[in-house]
Image (cartoon, rainbow, N blue to C red):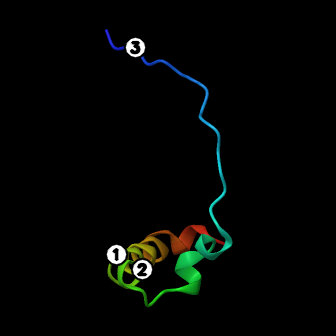
């Protein structure tokens, strides 16, 4: 038997302003260009037929 316990989440703190919308504002940065960009492009290719 597997039991999962649900507990209240800890306090949430919003990140600093310069972290908000980081990928759209910094697409050429290392991690964005090498990892996030290709994943976003694949997602858009795969799911574009389901958008408006």
- In-image side of 33 versus 6 (left or right): left
x and y, in percent, of residue 9 in the image: 59, 33
Residue holding disc 3: 3
- In this view, the mark in front (3 or 2): 2
Q: Earlier in the sequence, mark 3 or mark 1?
A: 3
Which of the image's four quarters has the C terminus? bottom right
Give the class, few, some or many, for how many residues have Cα within 10 Å of label 2's Cα (few <14, many ≥20): some
- Toward which corner of the image does residue 30 lie, by quadrant? bottom left
Give the secondary structure at mark 1.
Answer: helix
Give me the C-alpha separation between circle 1 and circle 2: 6 Å
Give the class, few, some or many, for how many residues have Cα within 10 Å of label 3's Cα (few <14, many ≥20): few
Q: Are marks 3 and 2 in contact (CB under 8 Å)?
A: no
- In-image side of 14 versus 22 (left or right): right
- Toward which corner of the image does residue 45 lie, by quadrant? bottom left
Q: Residue at x 58, y 67 (%)?
A: 50
Q: How many marks?
A: 3
Q: Vertical placement of 28 versus 41: above or below?
A: below
Give me the C-alpha separation between circle 3 and circle 2: 38 Å
Residue holding disc 2: 32
Q: Residue at x 58, y 85 (%)?
A: 25
Q: Vertical placement of 28 versus 51: above or below?
A: below
């Amino acid at each position: 038997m597997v039991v999962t316990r649900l507990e209240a989440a800890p306090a949430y703190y919003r990140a600093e302003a310069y972290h908000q919308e980081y990928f759209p504002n910094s697409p050429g940065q290392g991690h964005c260009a090498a990892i996030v960009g290709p994943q976003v492009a694949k997602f858009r290719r795969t799911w574009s037929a389901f958008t408006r």
